[in-house]
Image (cartoon, grey):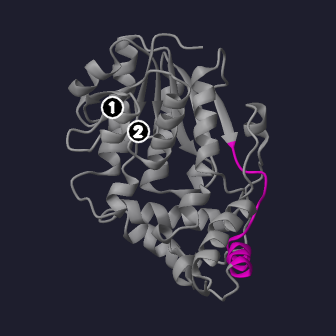
Amino acid sequence: MIDRGILLCGGTGELGGEIARRLSARGIPFRALVRPTTDAVELETLGAEVVRGDLRDAASLVPAVAGIGTVISTANSMARQLEGARNLTIRDVDERGYENLIAACEAAGVDRFVFASALGDFEAARTPFTDAKVATEARLRGSKLHEVIVRADMFQEVWFSPIVGFDWPHGKVTIYGEGRSHHAYVALGDVADAIVRLALATDPPCSIEIAGPEALSRQEAVEAFERVLRRPIRTRHIPRVALRIGRTLMSRPRPALASVMGMALEADLSDTLVRDEGLRSLGIEARPVGRYIEEVAGSAARAAAPA
């Protein structure tokens, strides 16, 4: 049920972009908060009302939330920092920025806040990024807003890609730790569908865990890619002790890198216990991780085959 307007924060990112496309496909008008220097052409093409602002600039959020009933936020600083940005920090964006946004929402009388969090033991991870997630979840629970916290397992499209060292197209993969813990990797599109449905639901839950229907270890994933590609993949392991040391030493100079190392360590120490119950409760048939591997690796294998 739509009560007043929808504001999307993070619409130029991968998950946010999927959400924007689904809102547009449903014919649902929405506003998008976009940083002043970021290209918003795709969002404008989708029919979004683009408002320029930044989570770090509290004053810029006032016009963004005016007349809004539901906020959907996937915004974070991780990708930009990992790509080399030095003009922002996790503390400024993922913690204080969300503090600014929640305060602006409360002042404007926003009803609902759908927050894209992550599945896992944040307390055990002990990283700047997961600490910020903990702080934002707590701040939402203590606010006047109806919080809808979406905790999703690792994305198939991200965690089986070169950006995190899983460079299967070039036949080389970095495994953090032993690579034998099992996780229910979930499709970005399925998470986007879930978030849109929760944003539009009459009475959504305050929190929901989202995961795929099939669990796979990193080592098993390498073997699955090898079977489909019909060629070997070279692997190297980063020992758990190196991840622990890196998480500590990099926390100040490179908080995003430290966060990746800490989250990878925690993921290597524990299995995902939930599956796709959350998605099925929303009427979504989740894509298994095995099917994703068959699709992307199969397409690459066919493209490389001689004519």
Quadrant where the C terminus lies?
Answer: bottom right
Q: Where is mark 1, residue-wise?
A: 33
Residue 184 x, y percent position in the rendering: 72, 56
Kind of residue at disc 1: Leu
Residue at 73% across, 31% down = 282
Relative side of 172 to 208, left or right = left
- Count the marks: how many? 2
Secondary structure found at label 2: loop
Instruction: Determine contact: label 2, label 1, CB under 8 Å.
Output: yes
Decide: is 168 above or below 25: below
Confirm whether residue 177 shows in the render. no
- At label 2, the amino acid type is Gly
Specify the quadrant of the image occupied by residue 216: bottom right
Magenta region:
210-228
Question: Can you identify the residue that label 2 sits on?
Answer: 11
- From where the camera sits, is residue 87 visible? yes
Where does residue 44 sit, x and y in percent of width and height?
A: 33, 33
> In terms of sequence position, does the residue under pointer 2 or pointer 1 come before the other?
2
Residue drawn at (71%, 67%) of the image:
294
On whether residue 214 falls in the magenta region, the answer is yes
Coordinates of residue 45 in the picture (x, y in percent):
36, 35
